[in-house]
Image (cartoon, grey):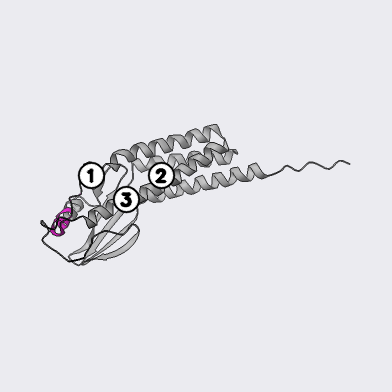
Amino acid sequence: MSKSARILTALAALLLLTLYIVPIWRISLLAPQYPEGLGMQIHVNTVTGVEAHDLDNINELNHYIGMKVIEPSSIAVLRIMPWVVGILAVAGLLVAAIGKRGPLYAWLGSFAGLGVAGLVVFWYWEYDYGHHLDEARAIIKVPGMTYQPPLLGSRQILNFTATSMPDIGGWLAGIAFLLGVVAVVMAVKAATSVPVEPRRS
């Protein structure tokens, strides 16, 4: 690995550490009765409201349709994610220190795999909350209706527009991955370039 590739890999790893500080994902709900909207932010180890009482208000609304209460302490993946991010960040710094192409390829592949796995788990979490309803407890019942927010983008759910997008941490994780891709490209180019021997007179 060239010095530049090692620096990019280290920067990518350090960017991952910001996920302990800023939210990764955001789900927003907009409706006529909530013109300012309600928001929920997914962090590496918890779920919070964008504003102080947003999560409580969302849980109160969910009660009417029989959805489970969103309790961060009961979401198992939130206990695992801090370890996953930490190990990935430390591994990236080690790869930058070692400076070998093989570990770099393995690290970026693990980064991609864990990112996809995280999205799949998030999608299933949304599916579980939006489909597995307690109909006996629900006050509002709409036959055939499901309440799963989109993984990415917007969807109309009754009179609410639900929008799901990366938050600051999600964008920073994306930038970190792109830095890793650039580092791999630089490493591949360095490995495949053949030095030109000077002509003999």
The dot on residue 122 is 3
Residue type indicated by callout 2: Leu
Q: Mark 1 points at which residue?
A: 72
Q: Which of marks 1 and 2 is nearer the N terminus?
A: 1
For the record, the magenta segment spans 59-70
Query: Which comes sooner in the sequence, label 1 or label 3?
Result: 1
Instruction: State the separation of the CA atoms marked 2 and 3.
Output: 12 Å
Identity of the residue drawn at 58% across and 47% down: 185
Query: What is the distance, in whole Å, between disc 1 and disc 2 at their CAs?
Result: 21 Å
* Other-residue count near label 1 (Cα within 10 Å), few / some / many at <14 / 14–19 / ≥20: some
Asked if marks 1 and 3 touch (Cβ < 8 Å), the reply is no
Residue highlighted by disc 2: 114
Query: Residue 183: horizontal and vertical position, in percent?
Result: 55, 44
Under mark 3, the amino acid is Phe
Helix, strand or loop for disc 3: helix
Judge from the rendering whether residue 169 lies leftward or rightward of residue 39; answer left or right. Answer: right
- Gap in Å between the C-alphas at discs 1 and 3? 13 Å
Q: Which residue is drawn at 22% across and 42% down?
A: 74
Q: How crowded is mark 2: few (under 14 residues within 10 Å), some or many (20 or more)?
A: some
